[in-house]
Amino acid sequence: MASKYADDTVSARQDITDEGLLCTFSRESSVYDPVTGGNTPVVTTFTGYAVKTRYKKNEIDGTSIKQGDSLLILEATTPAPIIGDKVTVTPNDTALSAIDYRVMDINPIDPDGSPIIHKVQIRV
């Protein structure tokens, strides 16, 4: 059954893609290799577009949200980011360099179980 918020997801994706920044997420894991008897590292990458914003002063508590943290309003991606992922945010201005962050928290906006967007807390 299709999500009753499917149109909202499409609209959010279009708006974020039009105005947002390219974000490349990297997730490190490992798989057991029976031949070597050890684990082999595996890196999974995926991309999405996001609008990067700052937290308001009253939202910064110094513990879970620290000074310098940023918030990404990210289009719904598959897979969804998880805490600990690395994210490289590429500016639209080619004169600027991409910046690497770490995902600290994620809050999917998914009123019926299908995400419309993800609110992703990032830290340098």
Image (spheres, rainbow, N blue to C red):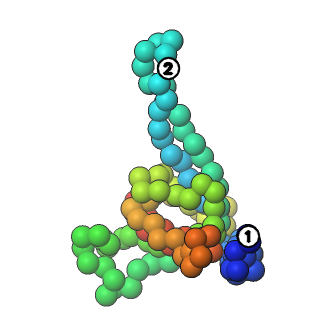
What residue type is disc 2 on?
A: Asp
From this view, report whether residue 120 is shown above or below residue 82: below
Mark 1 element type: loop
Residue farthest to the front, as pictured: 1
Q: Position of residue 25 (x, y in %)?
A: 56, 53
- Residue that numbered label 2 is attached to: 33
- Residue that numbered label 1 is attached to: 1
The residue sitting at 38% across, 70% down in the picture is: 69
The residue sitting at 62% across, 70% down in the picture is: 114
Earlier-in-chain disc, 2 versus 1 = 1
Q: Position of residue 12 (x, y in %)?
A: 68, 78
Q: Position of residue 26 (x, y in %)?
A: 54, 48
Tag 2: Cα neighbours inside 10 Å, few (<14), some, or many (≥20)?
A: few
Any part of residue 95 in sight: no
What residue type is disc 1 on?
A: Met
The residue sitting at 45% across, 66% down in the picture is: 106
Give the quadrant of the C terminus.
Answer: bottom left
Tell me how far mark 2 sits from mark 1, CA to CA: 39 Å
Q: Position of residue 23 (x, y in %)?
A: 60, 60
Tag 1: Cα neighbours inside 10 Å, few (<14), some, or many (≥20)?
A: few
Is residue 53 found left or right of 5 in the rendered image?
A: left
Front one among 59 and 83 = 83
